[in-house]
Each structure stands twice: as C-alpha cells, then as structure tokens.
Image (cartoon, grey):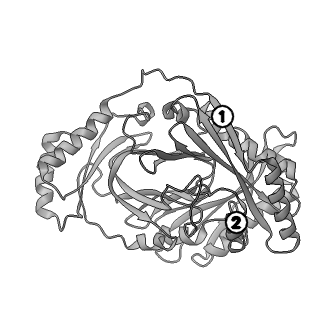
Amino acid sequence: MIKKSHLKECLNKAFNKKENNKTIFRYTAISDIDINNYPFNSKNKNIFYISYSEKKYFGIDKCIELNLTSKKNILDLIDTDIQVISYGKTTNKNIKFFGSVSFDMDSKFHHPSENIPKGLFFIPKILIEKTDSYITISFHTLLNKNIDLIIDEYSGLESIIIKYESNKKFKKTKIIKKTSLPDKSDYNNIFNKYIDDINNNKYNKIVLSRIQEITLDSKLNYFDMFKNMDNKCTNFLFSLNKDEKVFGSSPEKIIHLTNKKFTTEAIAGTYPKTNSDTRQNLLNNKKELSEHNFVIRHLIEILKKYSSDIKISKSKTLELSHLFHIQTPIEGSLKNNIHILELLYNLYPTPAVAGYPVKNTIDKINSNEPFSRGLYSGCFGWFDQNGNGKFDVSIRCALHKKNNLILFSGGGIVKDSNFEKEWLETETKFQHLLSSIL
C-alpha cells in the first residue's frame, strides 16, 4: 500500500507546482492487492472493473467525471486539458479516462434506461492495475483542498481496500420472476416489419433486440460472477449512479489504438452450440456471411479515410461458452495522429448492433423496440492524454438495479433470416451472462 508519510511529502511538493484547483495529483505504488481476490461486493457503491486478456483494472470512486449528453460531446473530450502531477512508480504513464457511451446518445431515454447517463468518463480516485508481472495502485485527487483532508480521503479509501470479504458466504442467487420484452408474438411482428423493409430495399440489415427483466431472490454476487465469466471476452462493470450498474462480457472490440497502430474486428454471424451444424458450416452459411460482411464493409469504409495500410485477416470462428461467431480481425496504421475518440465517433454503432446502412436503421430501431437500449450496444473502455485507448462494444450486458436485472440481447435480421432461429439466437445470448450469475 501507499506510505502516508511519503504521500504527504509528495503532496507538499505538488502544491508548489499546481496551476489551479483542477490540477490532479497522482501517486502510484507497487501493490499486493490482487484484483482476483478483491471483494466486488464492497459496501462502496462506486466501483468499476475491466478485464482484458492481458490486463485488469479495478477502481473505486471518481476523482473527476465528465458527463456526456449528446454524441458530439465525444469529440469535445479530445480537448480535455488537465494538469497531472505524478509521483511514485510509472510516473511517465499517461493518465487514463475510463467510461462508456450509449447506443444512441441523441435519443430520449425511457424504460429501463431513463435514469442512466448517456455517456460518462472519469478518472477513479483509486485505480488498481494488474498484469501477469505486476500490480500497481494509484491514488488520484484534485488539489483543491488542504493536505490533511486529502490524507483523510486516502485513508477512507484504503480502509475499503483492505477490508477483504473473501471468506464471506453468499447465498446462491435464484430467479424468482422473469419477463421478456417484446414477448415472442410482438417480436414476430417487428421481425416481419423489418423483413418487409429489407425486401423493399429500405436497408440491407437491421438488428432486433430484446430484454429480459429478472428479479433475484438475493444480492448479486459480483465476485463469483466475474470468476465464472468467459475469459475470451472483455468483462466489465461500471457504476452509473447510486443504485444502478451496468456489467457484461463482450466478445467484440470496436477499436484499439496504440501509437497510430489500430486493431478492430467484425463479429457477426452466430450459431448456438446446440446447433448440429459444425463451425465450418457457419463460415459457409450464406445468410450468416451476408450479415458479417456488412460489418466489414462499414469498418473499411470508415477506416480507409484515415489509413492506406489496412490488413483484413481471414475470417475464422470465435468459440464462446454458448455460441460460435464469425470473426474477422482487421488492423492497420493511421496516416496521421488521430485521437481514438475521433475513430470511435465515426465507427460506432456498427452494423453488428444497428444495421446497414447504419444511418437508415437507428431511428427505425428506436421507434420499434419497446424499450430504450441505453448503454446496450454502445461502447466502453478508456482513452489517455495521447489519444490512445481501447473500446469494446457493450453487448452481452445487463443493467443492475438493486435485486433486479435487465439483460439485453439482439440479432441481425437480413433477407434470409428465419424468425424461430433469430428468437433462439437471442435466447442463447441471454445464457452467456445468466450462466455466470446463477
């Protein structure tokens, strides 16, 4: 943990360097706190978590937060100007803003998303970062109060961290009520509307989604849930307000950028593992390939404006716990220094979660789906002061309100889609999260 005597010494130095009350002080130390053993069920309600294959982040509370109210606010973040004064280990690292954005930031939210932000980015007060070779803990605070108050602030956060609950026994969670919106009959009606539109050339593909509203008989055990999640996915949790969190297990990246080198991927086209067809048949399925290729086309149309060096890898199958997907990795180099938020702004939402052409489908989705997607099929991740970052698509996710869960699931509708198969696909996608929870 951080030695308070050294923390105080560094704070005294920082106050002599600060430019204004928006200056951020950061202190980083090597830590013995392992995220894998940390109690996600801490009484502190303001937590976040992202687990990539190579790195994990866990945070408590917010040093600063930036609320977004429209999509253009994503671009406004590029000019975020803050002074950061760093001490301790890894002082040369750029500070990261973590957060998420919703599917359609310019629409009016209603049930079940009426109380959540349209977009939110923040720097956590406590950030624990774990790789295979190290664990660090960083304390961030604004230099807008006296040193004794800052030390007290850190002490309060430290007490949360060291109060392990790993031996606490949690009751096994059970479902006591479950409803679906739309129900199967209404889903069929929307499905048929979309097929008519596709046959009338209004668009080539559109994504139809559903929610399951679930009441649990006990508190959700995040600690066990994340242990059970698929480690081929990016697993995540964000506190949205006092009583609501969004969490999930996403198999789909939208854009990762490091020093002008980018990677993205098309993931669309799905077989449930209960399907008797083989993986190879998925790669040869005309309908699934059609759905998949719309995503590739969209990504390339956008990225070719920024890069003349784009490599599209051979399509393959991605195997998850309950599903196979068609996956096509894409990588390249940017011609100029472009901030990841500019790429994100133009890339999302992709046809994998909206349709093709994207601009023809968003309003259609908002007017036909009997609920507000909110953060579902938006994006989550981080960016730093150099414009690098990582963003994944927030699919296979749920909104958590006390003992209630709202799970989201969707599938792409194209000309050759079959109603029963699409309904089964959404049912199977619900199981991706449910199998980790129950």
Image quarter in which the C terminus is found? top right
| Other-residue count near label 1 (Cα within 10 Å), few / some / many at <14 / 14–19 / ≥20 | few
**47 left or right of 197?**
left
Q: Is residue 164 left or right of residue 195?
A: left
Residue at the spot x=62%, y=65% of the render? 349
At mark 2, the secondary structure is helix
Residue toward you, 29 or 58: 58
Give x and y (percent) for residue 103: 59, 62
* Residue drawn at (67%, 75%) of the image: 301
The numbered mark at residue 32 is none
Residue 83 percent across, percent down from the top left:
25, 65
- The numbered disc on residue 367 is 2
Q: Secondary structure at mark 1?
A: strand
Q: Is residue 397 visible?
A: yes
* Horizontal side of residue 129 vs 10, given as left or right: right
Where does the N terminus fall, quadrant-wise?
Answer: top left
Which residue is identified by label 1?
177
How far is mark 1 from mark 2, CA to CA?
Answer: 27 Å
Q: Is residue 87 above or below residue 277?
A: below
- Residue 107: image location, x then y, percent: 58, 68
User: Crowdedness of circle 2 by 10 Å Cα count: few (<14), some, many (20+)?
Assistant: few
Residue placed most toward the observer, 153 or 391: 153
x, y percent for residue 182: 74, 51
Q: Label 2 amino acid?
A: Ser
Placement of 178 over or under 101, stated as above or below = above
Lower position in the chain sequence, tag 1 or tag 2: 1
What amino acid is labelled 1 in the image? Lys
